Amino acid sequence: MMKTTVKSLERSRQNLFIGGRFVEPKSGNYSASYDPTTGESWYEFAEAEAADVDAAVAAANSAFRNPAWRRMTQTDRGRLVRKLADLALERADELAAIETRDNGKLIKEMRAQMRAMPDSYHYFAGMADKLQGDTIPVNKLDMLNFNVREPLGVVGMITPWNSPLMLLTGTLAPCLAIGNTVVIKPSEHATASTLALAELITEAGFPAGVVNVVTGAGRSAGEALTRHPGVAKYVFTGSTETGRRIAANAASNLTPCSMELGGKSPHVVFADVDIERAVNGVVSGVFAAAGQTCVAGSRCFVEASIHDRFVEALVARTGRIKVGHPMLDDTDIGPLALSAQLTKVESYVASGLREGARIAAGGKRPQTDELSRGWYFEPTVMVEAQNDMAFMRDELFGPVVGIMPFSSEEEMISLANDTRYGLASGIWTQNIDRAMRFANQIEAGTVWINTYRSSSFMSANGGFKESGYGRRGGFEVMREFSRLKNIILDYSGAMQDPFVIRLK
């Protein structure tokens, strides 16, 4: 099998991966994927429709019942997942280059992601033979009452464009370790790396149909997948609006979902911190990945006594951020992944100005010739912001932060929780009592103290409120993608007459 590379993708047509083979879409339709640095098409992906999704789900269900997979020991499943990890590490730099070309993220960031990603596969591979049940007391002699955990069946995964493989890994690795089979629908804005991973699935030796990939638009492939009665559970990462549609579709078949949705995370800075350290934390939290992360700390609340000094330092640091081509190692921020995303960010900055905020840094597209064709936007600091302004309420998914002063802990907690989202939060303080009060009162699934965007696949995480439900990471995710079965065994050798009541 020919290995997908950035070079081989150029002007190519990429097919669906169903039942262990790459196959053309039944409609024969393909759509273009665009390079964010130029706005030009660089390959085409297959547009799956309902018939293709049916074939993928059928292949996954067949593989789930195939003794080659169903009867494989847990330890042997773990070995397969480890083999996949080793192959992914061998091709880490090429996978990184594919994602950078597809979504514009920095090559240095993607190399780090791809080289770290296999660790997650190894972690969950080690859990394959450690998912245990338990025994339960029962008030009868000669009876054994116990629980076992077993795989769900076919899991439908709808993945985003901002970090396709890393975010896929957090659910794919445990699903495979448990013994589920999978149908993946990657975002139509970044499909190439998922198709490249499918090649590694085959090379690792997974039975045909265990992993399937259907590409295409959400309105066709996504709709068909999320309404399919052959899927046992859905996992989705993306916007809250799309999450609502998926949950509604899944409800028609009573299919459960696990969702990581939008965020509008608060960043809180108290006067007792080292300002330079806190500025670096805020910059990392909202400008890394050009702000295209669900946990971006895009609302920044600063204690009033240091507000002006903090803003001055943040503006100075923002001015040193280099916007440039993502394949260059000295670039700090690359382009936004989509033309529509650039337009959205520009519109929210404009609305912030109309509502009374002021731009202290950035606020526009770079004016240089070498960046003019791509979807670039300067890192932007908005001051004199209010919590009810549109750009402070809605998820922008871009490099824009709004700054607000606060005067007391009570006011800060009220402002921080005044959002429909609850994905992440951060606080900068040297007062451990204050930090723990914040951690206990904030309505967010993740709390960072004197750091931001630090993550570990060994930790369970997820959102509150409209940021979704379900947990990923750690041992908790093994419960998310398995089901509990209760078994009761009477070994007395006799069955009591059901109509004879015996009093103790």
Image: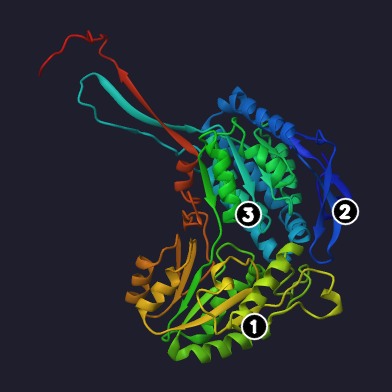
Earlier along the polypeptide chain: callout 1 or callout 3? 3
**At label 2, which amino acid type do we have?**
Glu
In front: label 1 or label 3: 1
What separation in Å lies between label 1 and label 3 (alpha carbons)? 27 Å
Q: Which residue is mark 3?
A: 166
| Pick the front one: 21 or 201 | 21
**At label 3, which amino acid type do we have?**
Met
Earlier along the polypeptide chain: callout 2 or callout 1? 2
Residue 143, image x, y percentages: 26, 20
List the single residue furthest toward the front.
354
- Residue at 50% x, 86% y is 275
Q: How is the image coloured?
A: rainbow
Q: Which residue is mark 2?
A: 10
- Residue at 80% x, 36% y is 25
Rendered position, 141 above or below 418 = above
In terms of secondary structure, where does tag 3 sit? helix
Left-right relation of 198 to 33: left
Residue 325, image x, y percentages: 79, 71
Q: Which residue is mark 1?
A: 318
Left-right relation of 74 to 213: left
Screen quadrant of the N terminus: top right
What separation in Å lies between label 2 and label 1 (alpha carbons)? 35 Å
- Residue at 64% x, 84% y is 359
